[in-house]
Amino acid sequence: MKINLDGKVAIVSGGTAGIGECICRSLADAGCKVATNYRNEERAQKWRDKNKQDGYDIAGYQADASDFEASQAFVDTVVQDLGPVDILVNNAGITWDGTLRKMKLEQWQTVMNVNLNSLFNLTRPIINSMLERGSGRIINMSSINGQKGQMGQTNYTTTKAGIHGFTMSLAQEVARKGITVNTISPGYIATDMVMAVPEEIRNKIVAGIPVGRLGTPEEIAALTVYLCSDHAQFITGADIAINGGQHMQ
């Protein structure tokens, strides 16, 4: 099934590495004009060089998704440069792990701002335009740990569980206006970050995954593209697990 998103404008937060980078490229392959944000200029230049080498033209803007005013300015610039936003993928996320009894306030607030507050910061400036045009796709990236919890990640797990609460409420608000809002909850995916984990630990992780392997960023991206298409018009408010059977609800 070939999905055609020709001419659609998509914003993917945190799209310069890992799953986000793959989502940007897959949306571009489907015909979208894609924009993402970044925080570090030096890393962004390497990302641009890589995109150019691989034949991708993805717009990158320096903006902190955890800052409301910066997010508003980012969205305004994308609209000015590319047009009204049809697709929003809230993918930005970080970890800063520790048990709660040792967790510093900064650890809690930083993870909360990047992982959860960024949803409001980016969705709020976009939602009215989607409502006026009677169409839109919003995908919020959660995690297997938002579904089952994880020791040493009270901050991260709280944000990832909260993401689906945001999804369910917003989906009900905008469903009759032609806008769908869904959550994707990946398990362990073979990103650079996961592959940097010592092989012995990775083998233990894989041993707990019924399909016997890590997921790929391409699999997450393919699901994202599908949810952005007309084929997925009847899917909204869903939390779709893609974890190889590691956690089932």
Image: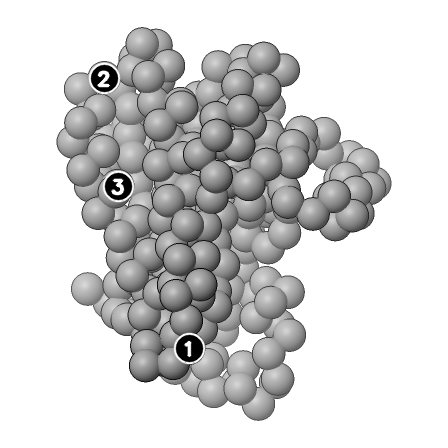
The residue positioned 38% from the left and 40% from the top of the image is 119
Packing grade of label 3 (10 A; few <14, some 14-19, many >=20) is many
User: Looking at the image, is 203 positioned above or below residue 53?
Assistant: below
Give how far apart the Cα atoms at labels 2 and 3 are: 15 Å
Residue depth check, mark 2 versus mark 3: number of the one nearer the observer: 3
Mark 2 / mark 3, whichever is N-terminal:
3
Q: Which residue is mark 1?
A: 98
Measured in 3D between alpha carbons, the distance from the residue under mark 3 to the one under mark 1, in whole angstroms, is: 27 Å
Q: Secondary structure at mark 1?
A: loop
Secondary structure under the numbered disc 3 in the rendered image: helix
Q: Residue at x 39, y 66 (%)?
A: 105
Circle 3 is placed at which residue position? 167
Counting residues from the start of the chain, the first of labels 3 and 1 encountered is: 1
Q: Secondary structure at mark 2?
A: helix
Please identify, in this view, whether the residue under mark 2 or under mark 1 is nearer the observer: 1
**Mark 2 vs 3: CB contact within 8 A:** no
Mark 1 is on which residue type?
Gly
- Give percent across and percent down for residue 175: 20, 25
Give the camera-side residue of 242 and 91.
91
Residue 126: horizontal and vertical position, in percent? 40, 23
Q: Is residue 224 visible?
A: no
- Which numbered tag is attached to residue 177? 2
Residue situated furthest top in the rendering: 132
Amino acid at dot 2 = Lys
Residue 117 position in % (x across, y down): 37, 44
Give me the disc on residue 55: none
Colour scheme in use: one colour
